[in-house]
Amino acid sequence: MTEAELIDVARETIFVMLKVAAPTLLTGLAVGLLVSIFQTLTQLQEQTLTFVPKMLLVFASMIIFLPFMLHSLMDFWKGIMDRIIIGGG
């Protein structure tokens, strides 16, 4: 494997990692922002108000986006296996 191929695999790995993590991270960001705006407007500083909705919605987003995440990871893995088969033959 040459340096260019190794850099290409590393770049693709980082892109897939971001693509898989983005739905849950963006959900957590949006929920956290909405809860903090709600707390600021109502001056209600309850600690459980920040964690419970964020935790529930992040888990729900993981369940909803799981097929997309698995498809992305399987496509990446198939590409890596193809590189191994082609490079090893």
Image (cartoon, rainbow, N blue to C red):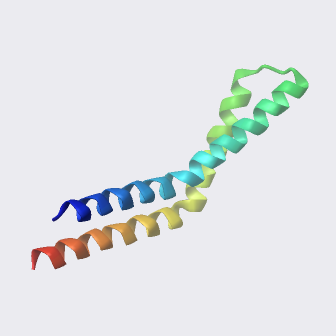
Most foreground residue, 7 or 59: 7
Q: Quadrant of residue 73?
A: bottom left
Residue 34 at x, y = what percent?
Answer: 78, 38
Q: Residue furthest front?
A: 4
Q: Where residue 13 appears, x then y in whole percent? A: 36, 58
In the rendered structure, the answer to whether residue 72 lies left or right of residue 86 reads right
Residue sitting at 65 percent across and 31 percent down?
51
State the residue at coordinates (32%, 67%). 77
Quarter-of-image position of residue 87: bottom left
Q: The C terminus is located in which quarter? A: bottom left
Give the number of callouts.
0
Q: Is residue 63 above or below residue 85?
A: above
Q: For this view, does 60 lie left or right of residue 3?
A: right
38, above or below 15, in the image: above
Q: Which residue in the rendered view is the most extreme toward the left?
A: 89
Q: Nearer the viewer, residue 64 or 20?
A: 20
> Hey, which quadrant is residue 79 in on the image?
bottom left
Quadrant in which the N terminus appears? bottom left
> In the shown orientation, is residue 15 left or right of residue 36?
left
Q: Residue at x 44, y 58 (%)?
A: 15
* Rendered location of residue 10, percent (x, y): 32, 56
Q: Residue furthest right?
A: 42
**Residue name at image x 48 percent, y 62 percent:** 69
